[in-house]
Image (cartoon, grey):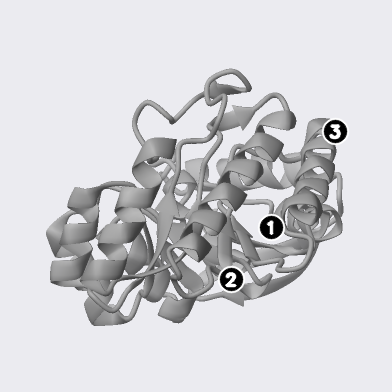
Amino acid sequence: MVGARSQIGNRHVHKIQKHGMIDLIKSIAAAAANQGHGQKPFYVLDLGALDRAMDKWELCLSQVKPFYAVKCNSDPTFLAALAMLGANFDCASQGEMEAVLRLGIPPNRIIYANPCKAAAHIEYAAAVGVNLATFDSMMELEKMKKWHPKCNLLLRIKAPNDGHGSLRPLGKKFGALTEEVEPLLQYAVVAGIRVVGVSFHVGSIAQDPIIYRHAIAAARAVFDVAAKLRMPAMHILNIGGGFRAGTQLFEHISNTINSAIQDYFPKDIPIVIAEPGR
């Protein structure tokens, strides 16, 4: 059941037949127990499943660049495999950025997607060249101006209907309200801070595809406010996470996202990114 063996970093990778994973897991667990390591926890990763998931993403959301949420699994072998498959990375802390950069992945493949960042972590991002981040408040703008003034920023907005279409809504913690958008952008203009796009997150484990459409419509409105303020044209849309990989619902959500992007950005389609994790 086990085929050729290769290596990623200092980790050995076995190529096995599709239905051979359980047998391999049992053999690895037995070998660990025989060597006296039975009490030490370890992971067995099916990188074939990861490859299939990335293929599915490319099939359903070909115009959306995935930035994997490192908080979900920071195992270095897993991250290295993702990088080899073309994924980028969503980091929420200095530790997560370090985990990605340690693998030789360039900083331009990282978004610092935390609307409430520690000053020391902002300084670290500036030092290593992570130049894309999110914000949702005046306080965060002031922090970025002080510690990373050259960073390109995405304004994170509260997704409309947040909490009605996902199991774990995030709108109570993160995201600027509609009435806060224009004052935040005006401050950014005066302060000389580059706001290059919009970000949202509908919440973890989305249940209803329509919430993505509503959120993309809200993002379009922010692009229009920026144009009204004569800001440089925004060109990035971050549609966050909440996807349920391996389900038919993912296909429905993908269709909704694709049609909404075409409807609300018919002539000026931005660079679209997302933050899948589960």
What is the crowding at mark 3: few (fewer than 14 residues within 10 Å), some, or many (at least 20)? few
Residue 222 sits above or below residue 121 on the image: above
Q: Nearer the viewer, residue 10 or 66?
A: 66
Q: Quadrant of the C terminus?
A: top right
**Amino acid bearing label 2:** Ala
In percent of width and height, residue 11 lies at 53, 68
Q: Secondary structure at mark 3?
A: helix
- Say which mark, if any, is on residue 47: 1
Q: Which quadrant holds residue 119?
A: bottom left
Position of residue 33 measured from the top left corner of the image (x, y, whole percent):
49, 41
Q: Which mark is residue 248?
A: 3
The structure residue drawn at horizontal position 86% and vertical position 44%, both measured from the top left corner, is 19
User: Number of numbered discs present?
Assistant: 3
Residue 83 tag number = 2
The answer, for residue 277, to whether it is visible in the render is no
Please tell me which residue lies in front, 201 or 52.
201
**Which mark is first along the chain, 2 or 1?**
1
